[in-house]
Image (cartoon, helix red, strand yellow):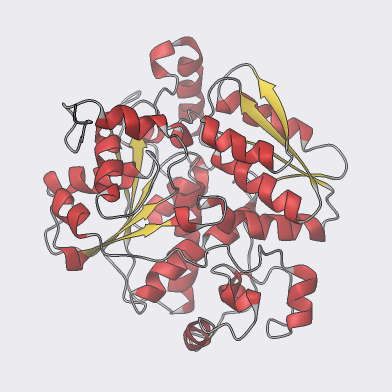
Amino acid sequence: MLDVKYENKPSSSLKEVFYERRNPQGSIYNESGVWRFRELLNFCEIETEDIEQCSKYLVSLDGAEGRQSKPYHMSKVAEFVGLDNENVVFQPEGYNPSGSFKDNGMSAAVTHGKMMGAKKIICASTGNTSASAGMFAANENMECDVYIPDGQIAPGKLSQAYQFGTQMVKVNGNFDDAFTKSLEAAEEPGSYTVNSVNPFRIEGQKTIPYRALEYLNWEVPDWLVYPGGALGNTSSCGKSLMELYEWGWIKKIPRIAVINASGANTLYQLFNGIFDEEKLRWNEGAPNFQLIQRFYDEMNKDENLKPKTKATAIQIGKPSNVAKGLRALEFTNGIVEEVTDKEMLDGMSVVGLNGFDCEMASGASVAGIKKLRDKGVIKKDDKVVGILTGRQKEPLLPIDYHNDPSNKFARPPKI
């Protein structure tokens, strides 16, 4: 398990610097929702106020990555999940240029890739990663090969990647098979993987909770809620909280809730002891990898265990960051819940009623908060931040949803 470690302890006085940079004064690195926090992910070891050094080393899409993604109150969503509007906010990462949270991590990963002399970036994708990787590669005049599970990618996401000039490599099987092939390809000289197994991508994704906490004036909420797929976001959120707590920037640790799709619920089954009656835990850095492998072996034999959900962004059976995800859950006393496709679609649709757009996987955050509130796990007065990981790129999903009058928020056409 690889981590990026920093020698210096950043001063909390940087909070004021970050706030002042929201007036970018012509600097795309101040405008960026990632590089605005560059002192907290300074793996380039640059002089952070030297714009020439920033321009030389930091990869940015003209400051657009993370620029507009911040928490918003959504009154109809709050009512749906059973919380007062003042107690819950949602952060739409679909405002990123490629339409998902991936741009936060990709800006940092490609920055490191260029430092290493990479000419080609490699990834496997269920859709969003391919769009982000292709966009950054095109912007930096790099090649990009994307390994995709044949027939399992949303056309809207795939079309983005094609538009950016990526080379698609179709793999028979699911995302996990494509991921294995991509790692083999990344061993070639000049190639560089940008999947979330890359620790520098995790560094960029730390800025998602940074922006949420900054919006809350660094007053820590009770819960941070994420959809669960490869667990890169879970890992990055955990790492950011561990560092902030160690540095003395926060005095309270929020709980992380990871929400799996019930059709792709590896972590839910393992963490809650549903498989083999043993609860998988971090265990001081020694999780039971044999338990994980037994589950994967069973998955390979049992079609019912293989990932299957319309929320393709989280249709992952073998999360590549399971160890780091377990570490994050232990540090935050976190939990793992599952929701059905129907519940995710309801969550996606009620977000739309507030004038925001999100994909089905983002609906997992909404549905998960509602389910945990209904169970009494999330209390009435708890402060909650839900992360909406991407915008809608599967146009048939909402059309099909609204043409079915049985759906909670359906608005079928009038005749």
Please, which residue is most extreme toward the front here? 415
- 385 over 157 or under it: above or below: below
**Residue situated in front as seen by the camera: 288 or 214:** 214
Residue 334 in the image, given as x and y percentages of width and height: 32, 51
Q: Quadrant of residue 307?
A: top left
Q: Say whether residue 377 is visible.
A: no
**Residue situated in front as seen by the camera: 236 or 227:** 227
- In the image, what residue occupies the spot 51% across and 87% down? 20
- 174 over 301 or under it: above or below: below
Residue 151 in the image, given as x and y percentages of width and height: 56, 20
- In the image, what residue occupies the spot 46% across and 53% down? 94
- Left or right side of 210 for 380: left
Q: Say whether residue 277 is visible.
A: yes
- Left or right side of 96 for 392: left
Q: Which quarter of the rendering shows the C terminus?
A: top left
- In the image, what residue occupies the spot 64% across and 75% down? 29
- Left or right side of 315 for 259: left
